[in-house]
Image: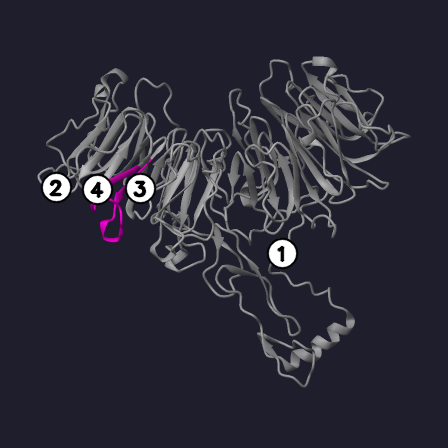
Amino acid sequence: MKAIPRALGFICLCVLMAGGCSKSQKKSKPEIDSATGSGHSRNDTGDSADTDHAMDTDNITAIDSDSASDHDADTETQSSSKCAAGTFDDDRNADTPCVPWSDCVPGQYVVRVGTSLTDRTCGQCQPPATTTDINAPWCTISPFKKVATGYDHVCAIMGSPDGKQTPNDGMIFCWGNNEAGQAVPPADIRFDDVVASSRHTCGIVSASDLNDDLQSNALCWGSDEYGESSPPVGARFRNLYTGLHITCGIVDGDASSAPVDDGEVLCWGIGSSDVSVPPGDSRFTALGIGGHQTCGIVDGGDDDGKVICNGDAVTGQTALYDDVQFVQLSAGEYQICGITAGEDDAGHMICWWSDTNGRITPPGDVRFRRIAGRGHQICGIVDGGDDDGKVICMEGPMFGAPLPSPPENVRFHQIDVGIHTVCGIVDGSGADQRLDGTILCWGANRNGENILPDARFRGFTAGSEHACGIVDMGANDGDLVCFGANTWSECIPPTGVRFGQIAIGRDHTCGIVDGGDNDGTAICWGHNTSNQCDLPADMHFRHITASETHSCGLIDGGSDDGKVICKGEDIRTALDAPADVRFQQIAGGRFHTCGIVAAGNSAGQVTCWGETIYGERIPPAPADIQFSAITAGSDHTCGIVSGGSNNGKAQCWANEMDSSLIPPDTVRFRQISAGTSHICGITFDDADTAAEGTVVCWGSDEFGESTPPDMPFMEITAGNHYTCGIRATDGQQICWGAIARNLWKE
């Protein structure tokens, strides 16, 4: 990873050696807590909250020389003289020949090298990481060859490092907003092209992957409310284009049974009342679909290279340049822009727009090789000169603040523009070839679309309006990455600070500093009108929680060790932490906070303060029930029972609680996390219920937030209609529900 965004709207670039990244060893495992619908807790009887994440990939090339018994050591010494390098004695019989170590094929990496008694162990790389060589020591990120930016989600086609074929080549990777399923592409299908819109995504399937089940080489996923994800049966396309609720394609007549000829256009779905197919029966080389028009570049005949449009004539978006030929188009809400053809004028950008809304005026002395636009902005890649490959972005004059400036001194192969985000594939042929094919995004980052899916976190929390993660890699280790609502700068953490734990409120964020002179102190930022960001700067904390309009900290050390102090708006006694009680853990909901008592006759019991309208601060009977972990949702609270016949089971409480929030009675958990209206937990190994690390969720499943993927997790956090977890096998972040990351649908 080269750059991590420190703010919503800042730049994020991810270049990661996946699978073989070294992990910084921390003195304690950071925790994440979010009280406004995303608190989570770990069962102390399982993985302690004070221990590091344990990953099989932490020491993937190490050999544990102390793990063998004395007998095995003697046997290995005898066998070493028998077995040549690269072979092992598989049956430990001196009279049988040694056998070669197994090879780790492309797509796998070496977890453990072989010995004279043991075979080589291989692990599977997870996309977007892969390997191209036999027995590769670690996985590396696949380069990307095409990126498509929707309104607030991103999809990209993976390529192959060094031109070598890999299992990832042609697969689509998506991340960001997933409310309609637009960020979960089909699994095991390879694509040649991808385009993205607001709530749907489409791609052209590679010829090698076409089969009888695919009725067109166009395949779409996400919203199909208007038929925008249902391409015509039998049609084959050479290019696809998307509008808000419409998809169009230029027909490939050589391989299509479509009712139109080669080069003509077919569309499905609907646009606004004034958007339709370009006029006439012309053939086209390229299209541009905007909010009020569809335009195309004519292919052949007297109008070859000219643009013709269909749409709202009031906005002046019919072709205005009858004597100009174009090679590329891009359309936004009220503008059409094109790159000119010809020997003398090639590469100039021309835009036309409604006079009532203002016009983009591209720089006349700059030539462009590619352009992309959406909404009210247009970006182009400079062609030639000192700025060759750099990006220039422009926005209509009536629409307020422009997009964040593109990164300086970075050159791109290709870019695409969303409503809130711009993404590009880096051209690393100059200064740093290691970056070639990587993706860099900048913009609003409302759904994490600027944080590439190969980012690794050691802790992550999902709040009701924003989310943050603690980076676990290289020079950025301990840095904080946030995305989501940023009205009060709650997604702009302080620079130069590393964090060990994070808590998220509705409009503010707090963190406990990890290391340095301020180690253990709390820093908060964001909305502070009620002083919710004013936890004492001279105190040390072992745990903090942030709520709707207040924050609480569990004091670490000194005469007040274990006591809780709260700051913010005192709604319904939200700040009234008991002065004579010491706690081992706390969790905050919207207007209530609960803690597990640390010592005395009440040790392990839960004490709560604040709002109790819904019974969220009244633990279930019997009163002496003990808990090992606790988490708070918006208006409900859950805990993991400690001891007795219900040890490890979850209990939730709140008067009038929706029956869907009642936890399963047969599952035991080592960690749980409460979202706004759903709860998820990581299970203990139980042959009768679920395997170790399996995620079980209950509550609302409107966006699939309670339908986890079938894989083991080491940590989980529930937010507002989405859930994220850190996968146990490789530390990869997986999200499902309204925000998706690293998922494929079968």
Q: Nearer the viewer, mark 3 or mark 2?
A: 3
Say which element carries label 1.
loop
Element at label 2: loop
Would you name the residue on which mark 2 appears?
343
Extreme residue in the bottom direction: 95
Inspect the image, locate mark 2, and give the three-letter code of the amino acid beneath it: Glu
To which residue does mark 3 refer? 240
Q: Which numbered disc, 4 or 2, marks the residue that appears first in the sequence?
A: 4
**Are the two marked residues, 1 and 2, in contact with CB atoms closer than 8 angstroms?**
no
**Of 367 and 664, the residue lying toward us:** 664
Kindly identify which residue carries mark 4.
264
What number is the disc on residue 59? Answer: 1
Give the image quarter of residue 263: top left
Residue range corresponding to the magenta coloring: 247-267
Of residue 708 and residue 386, the one placed in the foreground of this image is 708
Q: Is residue 386 visible?
A: no
Crowd tier of the residue under label 2, counting other residues whose Cα lies within 10 Å: few below 14, some 14–19, many 20 or above: few
Q: Position of residue 471 (x, y in %)?
A: 57, 40
Magenta span has 597? Answer: no
Quick one: label 4 or label 1, which is nearer the N terminus? 1
* First along the sequence among labels 4 and 3: 3
Q: Are marks 4 and 3 in contact (CB under 8 Å)?
A: no
Q: Residue 159 location in percent, x, y?
A: 39, 52
- The amino acid type, in three-letter code, at marker 1 is Asn
